Structure formats: C-alpha cells, structure tokens
Image (cartoon, rainbow, N blue to C red):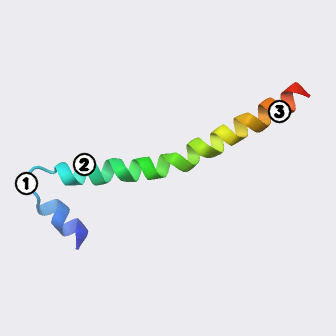
Amino acid sequence: MCRAVLESEEGQATAEGINKGIVYLMAFPYILIGGLGYFIYRKLKTK
C-alpha cells in the first residue's frame, strides 16, 4: 500500500525522503559498530 502511494505521487519528494530515511537507518548501526571497534583497537594498541 505504501509503495503504491509513493509510486503514484507526482513530485516523488516523499519517495526520496523515505529512501534517505532508509539509508540513514541502515548506516547508523554500522557507524556505531565501527566506532566501537576503533575504540577497542585503540585501547588494545596502547597497552
């Protein structure tokens, strides 16, 4: 249902917003895991 509404819209502005939100939600966990990995690496490197 959501897909049909997004595809039928004229300006596609809502669809672009939804896509950017999905990318944001997908990227955020990877950034957190990367930051945690870097922190652990730095802690182990200094010892």
Q: How far is the residue under mark 3 from the one under mark 1?
A: 52 Å
Residue wearing tag 2: 16
Name the N-terminal-most of marks 3 and 2: 2
Q: Position of residue 7 (x, y in %)?
A: 16, 61
Amino acid tagged 1: Glu
Query: In the figure, residue 33 lies in which quadrant?
Result: top right
Query: In the image, is 3 to the left or to the right of 37?
Result: left
**Left or right for 28, reference 15:** right
Q: CB under 8 Å between callouts 3 and 2?
A: no
From the top left corner, tell me how far across and down residue 14 is, in percent: 20, 53
Q: Amino acid at mark 2?
A: Glu
Q: Which mark is residue 10?
A: 1
Identified at 15% across, 51% down, the residue is: 12
Residue at figure coordinates x 17%, y 49% from the top left? 13
Q: Which residue: 47% across, 51% down?
A: 26
Of residue 46 and residue 8, the one placed in the foreground of this image is 46
SS for dot 2 = helix
Residue tagged 3: 43
